[in-house]
Amino acid sequence: MMKTLIIALALLGQESGPLPDLSHPWTLRECTDWAMENNLTVAQQRNTLESREVDKNTATWAWLPSVNASAGENLNFGRGLGGNNTYERGNSSTTSFGLNAGMTLFDGLATPNRAALARLNLEAATEDLNKAQDDVRVNVAKAYVQILYNYEILDVAREQFDIDSLQVVRLEGLFDNGKASAADVSQQKASMAQSRLSIVQAQNNLRASLLDLAQLLEFPYWEGFSIVRPHLEMEDVAIGNPDDIYADALGIRPSIRAEELRLKGSERSIRIAQAQYYPSLSLSGGVNTNYYSSFADQNFWQQMSNNFGNFVGLSLSIPIFNRFSTRNQVRTAHLNKQAQEIKLRLVKQTLYKEIQQAWNGAVAARAKWESSQQAESAARDAFELQLAKYENGKATLTEFNESRNRLVKAQSDAVQATYEYLFQTSLVEFYRGGALDF
């Protein structure tokens, strides 16, 4: 315990953050909310989103003029150009001040297209964040269901251990009365030992699954972590067909939306590259003044006033030949658009395959769940019948243990099928836009 505490404190010293309250079992919603705030993958995407917000702000204000102020002080020693525009010998100094501004009036619409591209990149980054959050939701739900499954398996193992313990007590009583052999008692004790081992294995699997979820949630420590075991009302869910699910998912899945936005962005990139074919027109203006120290008859402020000047100008740049640079940039932009079209098709194809797999898994899980429920019911009836026969001396211990083992397997299969059906049907609804919650 002390070693675990030391490690936890060391981790907290590296990175301060919120501490999880492990004094109560966590619901799936609590786990998901915590992951949204603390998962490092989500944090990376959130940081990228903020960076795209800065890029958008920069591109949005690019049309504003740039304004710069300047000041200078020059010292001349020896012969030099004097204030009366003749060369003189002596030391002098010149002080100058200026304020200049300039802005682009036309650049082939590159500036508005850059602003539009920045907005599309920001929207795409938002969808990337949504996708990262959805991926975490799925992983958290999957880990949560695995823990629930391991809880149920532990319950089954404990139930079987109780049955074996009662049978050991019963056989020891019969042995004392000379109605059971030592071999029967030893065999039943061996079965009880195996049941105890099954409990230990189930406990280890449960701890491992709790650790998996705690690591997914980025917990600095996890001892004492547990989850709420909800009361499940299993029912036959309308799964639909994969094509309808895919049609619904196309309009809402962030992975598709992000690539569609990037495709629009690639079209803007083409326009930005094509803008270099057009002339650019710039406007500039400014004011300036200076002071020359050899003007003995004028003080500083008089010279600053007399030397005050201003200017305004237009500059037109016409591209004629730039070693085919613009042409190749346009070609590259078109190739990038084609690559983005292919990527969008690949993402759609991947989504359809995922939906097909989820739908097929849900259909298979439903069939498995229905059959496992029937199998468990039949195995329980058979076990109770065999138990009655065994207690009345009409069945052997071997027959009793075989019946018990069949019941254990049927219970385990039923538990696995239940949670597999729960997760797969929830996943199908998730692709349709539903929440992963149960």
Image: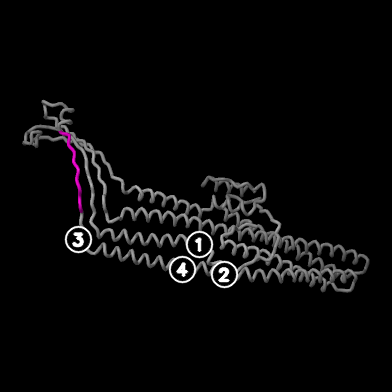
The residue closer to the viewer here, 63 or 140, is: 63
Residue assigned mark 4: 346
For residue 348, side relative to residue 264 (left or right) = right
What amino acid type is highlighted by mark number 2? Pro
Residue assigned mark 3: 320
For residue 240, side relative to residue 372 (left or right) = left
| Bounds of the magenta segment | 307-316
Whether residue 156 is in magenta: the answer is no
Above or below — where is 12 with respect to 249? above
The residue closer to the viewer here, 193 or 391, is: 391
First along the sequence among labels 2 and 4 = 2
Query: Of all residues shown, which one is farthest toward the right?
Result: 177
Alpha carbons under labels 1 and 3: distance apart: 46 Å
Name the mark on residue 251: 1
Residue assigned mark 2: 242
Q: Mark 3: which secondary structure?
A: loop
Instruction: Assess disc 2: are there few (<14), some (14-19) or many (≥20) residues with their C-alpha within 10 Å of its C-alpha.
Output: some
Position in image of residue 91 (x %, y %): 11, 32
Q: Main secondary structure of the magenta part?
A: strand
Q: Mark 2: which secondary structure?
A: helix
Position in image of residue 344 (x %, y %): 44, 66
First along the sequence among labels 1 and 4 = 1
